[in-house]
Image (cartoon, rainbow, N blue to C red):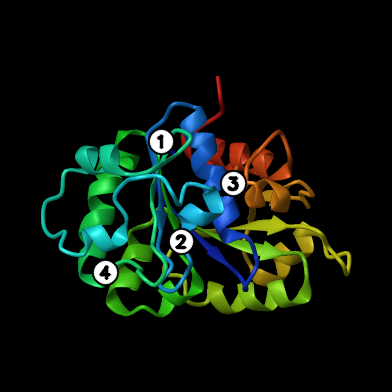
């Protein structure tokens, strides 16, 4: 696959979908391919908070409420806040994406990233699956949906429920720890999807986020999973 639009959805609350989405976008940027990380949470506190860039200037979803029709994706990318080299479209506290603007904004960003052999990463919470025609059409337009699934019974049950609502190609990203010793192959068999990557428990993750560094520091399991996913859409690193 040479470039893609990828949605990342959690199988249950706290699955870590935003962390996986951020890790994928960061890995794509490190390979110097076009990318953008888009927060589709309807009620979240803002992806920029997780990334530690909530004080940085730039356009966010409330500023795009009137965006309609043909949008210049390159111009929009230039006006977004950045997490390192990753442009981010974030919600604000109490201000999620305007449903009327959603499709046009995402289409413009896809043209500026995925259509140029990059990866557009959509951090889509489970509420987006029930967000009517706008949410459904977004997922249908994705080249793949990554379903982030913890290695526990609740994660497997949630993944099976979400899988039935996904319109196209999908794969699992499984996350440790595994309190009941469920293995990735067992989860894949139960859910009926292949495993695209595995992210083990990262003890440094919470501290990095609290210090404002974002969820991908060092060479931990989340970073390694991001690199693996980037290779899935861009091909092996040279």
Q: Find residue 98 and name its label.
A: 4
Above or below for 112 versus 37:
above
* Local secondary structure at mark 4: loop
Seen in the image, is 80 located left or right of residue 151?
left
Question: Counting other residues with Cα less than 10 Å from the Cα at mark 2, is it few (<14), some (14-19), or many (20 or more)?
Answer: many
Q: Which residue is mark 2?
A: 46
Sequence order check: which comes first, mark 2 or mark 1?
1
C-alpha distance separating marks 2 and 1: 30 Å
C-alpha distance separating marks 3 and 2: 14 Å
Residue 227 occupies which quadrant of the picture? top right
Q: Which residue is mark 3?
A: 212
Q: Residue drawn at (39%, 72%), measured in percent from left and top?
A: 94
Pointer 1 and pointer 4: residues touching (CB < 8 Å)? no
Q: Which residue is mark 1?
A: 2
Seen in the image, is 56 located left or right of residue 79?
right
Residue 74 position in % (x across, y down): 23, 37
Sequence order check: which comes first, mark 2 or mark 4?
2
C-alpha distance separating marks 1 and 4: 30 Å
Sequence order check: which comes first, mark 1 or mark 4?
1
């Amino acid at each position: 696959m040479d470039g893609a639009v990828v949605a990342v959805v959690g199988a249950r609350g706290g699955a870590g979908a935003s962390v996986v989405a951020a890790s994928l976008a960061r890995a794509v940027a490190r390979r110097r391919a076009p990318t953008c990380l888009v927060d589709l949470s309807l009620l979240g506190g803002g992806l920029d908070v997780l990334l530690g860039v909530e004080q940085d200037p730039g356009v966010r979803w409330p500023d795009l409420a009137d965006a309609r029709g043909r949008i210049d994706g390159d111009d929009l990318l230039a006006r977004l806040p950045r997490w390192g080299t990753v442009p981010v479209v974030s919600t604000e506290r109490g201000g999620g994406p305007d449903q009327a603007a959603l499709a046009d904004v995402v289409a413009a960003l896809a043209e500026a990233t995925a259509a140029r052999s990059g990866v557009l990463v959509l951090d889509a919470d489970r509420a987006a699956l029930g967000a009517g025609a706008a949410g459904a059409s977004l997922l249908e337009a994705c080249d793949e949906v990554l379903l982030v699934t913890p290695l526990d019974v609740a994660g497997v049950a949630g993944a099976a429920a979400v899988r039935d609502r996904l319109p196209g190609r999908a794969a699992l990203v499984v996350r440790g720890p595994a309190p009941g010793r469920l293995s990735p192959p067992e989860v894949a068999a139960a859910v009926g999807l292949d495993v695209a990557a595995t992210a083990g428990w990262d003890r440094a993750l919470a501290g990095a986020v609290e210090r404002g560094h974002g969820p991908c520091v060092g060479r931990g399991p989340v970073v390694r999973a991001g690199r693996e996913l980037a290779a899935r859409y861009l091909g092996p690193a040279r």
